[in-house]
Image: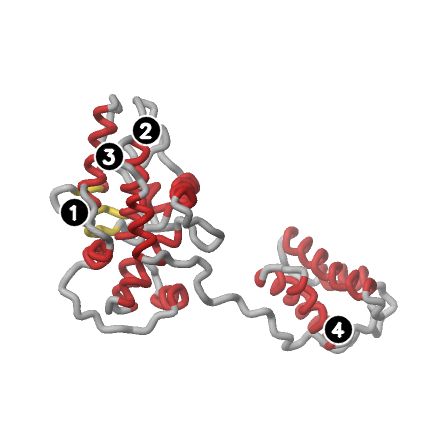
Amino acid sequence: MNSNLTIQQLISTFLAQKDIAATSRKTYRSTLGSFFRWMVDKKYTARKPKREQIIEYKAYLIQVKKSDATSNLYLNSLKSFFSWLEESKIYPNVAGKIKAPKRYQGFKKQRLSIDQLNYLLNSIERNTLKEQRDYSMILLAFTNGLRTVELSRLLIENIDTVLMKAHIQRKGDLYPMQWLPITKECLNSISQYIQSRIDAGEEITNNSHLFVSNVIGRNSNPLSAQEVGAIISKRLKAAGLHSKTVTAHSLRHSAASYLLESGWSVYEVQKFLGHKSVTTTELYLKTADLVNMHNEKPQETLSKMLQKIEA
């Protein structure tokens, strides 16, 4: 390098000229330090890095299983630093145009087959409050493609038993709410669960949460999104279906993919899932744009795929 400064001094000079927050400054120093320590460990000349060595370093990050986001952070730090070195006439930009690892663009959760979905639902007896709650939660999650956070936010008043709709507060949005139809089977299951809570002595109001943790007595606590996910995962495990790729979110993935295979367009499924951008739906499901020729609601399409279950 065309400078009498040490590498650490060069990094300090580089950072002194960047208008960034203290936390970002610390991150730059850490990621750049990691690269030069790797150079030393490999017995490369730290003051004379070569382009092929940076490419090798990228492979090293992948080898040690750094996430794509972390690898990109490390490489972007190098790009910025070597760009500055070149502008300062200290060293050529050997990191220029190094490609970052590509993020996985598919869906990381596996969907459940219709037989597996039926088996999961039929494995829940529905004799106790917890069984009624879990059954209703899973059936609603699948037939409406809901996220765990959307299930956790539901209040009693969000279920319209007359119009057979649920008022859903989407992920990350306080408003607007979205009305979604719910199937007769799902409504009957939810109604039975609510009535059982009342029969158990719970004082339920319109502002009471639909899915609660303590389902006996008056001290019911609303379930968090994490708790909803854990309960569904527990049911999947009990049915022998749970794995790293089959979780609560697999219900939502299954719902969307089956709708697409049944002829619902990607734009209709986008609205069904509550995605702000159709691009998200396409990446999420790897779908094609199909023209919907159905005269029924998407909830009915999904419900009909399940074996008839007595309410």
Rounded to the nearest angstrom, the CA distance separating label 4 from label 3 is 62 Å
Amino acid at pointer 4: Gln
Nearer the camera: disc 4 or disc 3: 3
> Are the residues at dot 1 and dot 4 in contact (C-beta closer than 8 Å)?
no
Vertical comparison of 125 with 71: above or below:
above
Q: Distance between the residues labelled 3 and 2?
A: 10 Å
Few, some or many residues within 10 Å of mark 2 (<14, 14–19, 20+) = many
Mark 3 or mark 1: whose residue is earlier in sequence: 1
List x then y, in percent, for residue 116. 34, 53
Local secondary structure at mark 3: helix
Figure check: 309 above or below 67: above
Q: Do labels 4 and 3 touch, CB within 8 Å?
A: no
Q: Are marks 3 and 1 in contact (CB under 8 Å)?
A: no
Q: Mark 2 points at which residue?
A: 215
Left or right of 249 in this view: 46: right
According to the image, label 3 marks what residue? 193
**Horizontal and vertical percent for residue 211?**
31, 37
Of labels 4 and 2, the one closer to you: 2
Q: Which of marks 3 and 2 is nearer the N terminus?
A: 3
Amino acid at the residue labelled 3: Tyr
Question: What is the C-alpha distance between the residues marked 3 and 1?
Answer: 14 Å
Under tag 1, what secondary structure? Answer: helix
Q: Quadrant of the C terminus?
A: top left
Quadrant containing the N terminus is: bottom right
Could you tell me which residue is drawn at 82 percent across and 73 percent down?
A: 48
Asked if the residue under mark 2 is in contact with the one under mark 1, i.e. CB atoms within 8 Å, the reply is no
129 displayed left or right of 240: left
Which badge, 4 or 2, comes first in the chain's sequence?
A: 4
Residue with the mark numbered 4: 53
Q: Which mark is residue 184?
A: 1
Residue 201 picture location, percent across and down: 25, 21
